[in-house]
Amino acid sequence: MCRATIASVCCAESDSFSRFQEGDPERNGLVNDVPHRLSLSFEEPSEDIVLVSAGSMVLQTTAVQVTRLAHELQVQEVSGHQLTDLCPGLRLKQATATRLDAKDKVLHLSDGSSVRYGRLCICTGGRPRLPLPDHPAVIGIRDGHSVDELVRRLGPARRVLIVGNGGIASELVFTLKDVDVTWVIRDGSISATFVDPGAAEFLLPRLESRDQQPAAADATVAVPAPPSKRWRYHASDPPSSEGGQGDPSVPGSALGPDWLQRLQARGAGKGRVTVKYKTELRRLVDRPNDPNDSEQWPVYAELTSGETIGCDFIVSATGVLPNTEPFTEGTSLRLAADGGILVDDHMRTHETDVYAAGDACSPDWELAPHWFQMRLWSQARQMGLYAAKCMSADRLGVPLLQDFCFEMFAHVTRLLGHKLILLGLFNGQRLGTDYTALIRMTPGVEFIKVVLRDGKVQGALLLGDTDLEETFENLILSQMDVSHLGDDLLSPDVDIEDYFD
């Protein structure tokens, strides 16, 4: 809507519909949803669709199918004019949303104009969660502008402090060269947003030797290394001790899965990485009176552990908050506890003819046993596509079943140089301690974790080129009993791909 974000970008490629037409209440409008609009345009090419975006550039996604539900996304920045050439019924309105008048179906914009709509889809994504939002020494990594600012600051930098433990923080720590990195995480292991402590141990050697390429398991290797560790543990066991152009003040399109290609810069340090576990950034302080510290730094950060660290600047990658502010005042939109706009199983909000998709929304329907929301590109794209279909179906008065993508969580990305595929309840989400996990690990090559309950696969985490994603997706969806296999489910001597074909 007012800002290009994950959801909006994905929607444009998807089928989500939001149509706006100035002065025409029969038209519908989309805010910041490029994929959504394209999908809507393909669904109903004769309809007028208005895309409201803060910038003239938008992100377009291309999905490469990995399994039935998992897709690897490729994202490119394109001009809004390219979209209008592709979809004649689509118009780009460069502005931000300031207020929604849902009663009269009018969206007010930052340039003083307003848009009347027939149906509206809010796809404004999320905004960075910053620990110190107004301090010039803190950069929030979220869009292309913030990455460009990071590149600019990296040149003379000797030490950078990175706060956060998700995908962006992990990839940033792994990618930065010739600069000392202090990585502050509140968890007891790295990359905890995606992987458990066991997988984190698998990734640590890769972090410690960042200039090396990950080992590959392929047919050119004469004798593949056998798994050195394969074990079973129970959830109740204790853990082992081992974007767009324009005003930089307005958030642009959210970073795509391949955002690191923009990061072509090196610092002026030695390239050492220090991880500070179970601690957070407390505040910024003046230079400490430490006679042993001969170096001077532009900024000093005090951690909750009591330690003070000097650095050139701080990068915050601590996740996002739903970007819903322009639409909630004076409307009947209801928000979830996480701040997202509540939507039903047809992506409809509590306001008539107002829909929402992607990071800006939260599901308010009974979820399938193996699906849950994570604010990721993959889900934003799925929601955008589905929202477009829902808007079109509602306008035409035809029934529409919920999209199959909501049957099981599936996400494909890369983490510290390894391919990562997450399926179903990959970390035992919503299962409490009532599950068992099987693990197989070949150092530097692969890490496989399968979550089981009552002999049935509930989720899987696949690091490396395992070629097992289709097998485990089918086992999760079918809920076939595999208890007769026991630990052999992950035995390298059993070809389970053929076994369950």
Image (cartoon, rainbow, N blue to C red):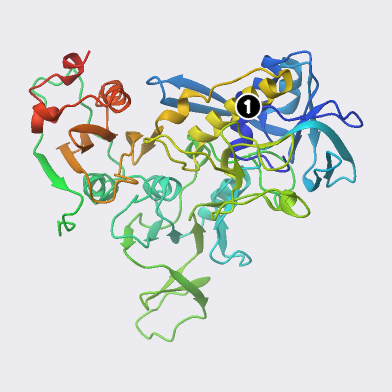
> Which of 408 and 62 lies nearest the eye of the viewer?
408
Give the farthest residue toward the right: 23
Which residue was labeled with disc 1? 35
Q: Quadrant of residue 271?
A: bottom left
Specify the amino acid type for callout 1: Pro
Q: Quadrant of residue 500?
A: top left
Residue 206 x %, y %? 26, 44
**Residue 92: in sight, yes or no?**
yes
Question: Which residue shows up at 51% across the image and 24% down it?
Answer: 403
Question: Which residue shows up at 38% across the image and 21% down it?
Answer: 66
Q: Is residue 319 depicted above or below 445 in this figure?
A: below
**Residue 442: in sight, yes or no?**
no
Question: Which residue shows up at 46% across the image and 48% down it?
Answer: 266
Q: Please give left or right for residue 150 compared with residue 202 in the image.
A: right
Q: Please give left or right for residue 123 compared with residue 425 in the image.
A: right
Residue at disc 1, secondary structure = helix
Q: Quadrant of the N terminus?
A: top right
Query: Number of numbered discs present?
Result: 1
Q: Please give left or right for residue 467 compared with residue 311 in the image.
A: left
Q: Quadrant of residue 338?
A: bottom right
Residue 288 x %, y %? 45, 83
Q: Please give left or right for residue 291 compared with residue 198 in the image.
A: right
Residue 305 x %, y %? 35, 75
Q: Quadrant of the C terminus?
A: top left
- Mark 1 nearby-residue class (10 Å; few <14, some 14–19, many ≥20): many
Residue 352 x %, y %? 74, 37
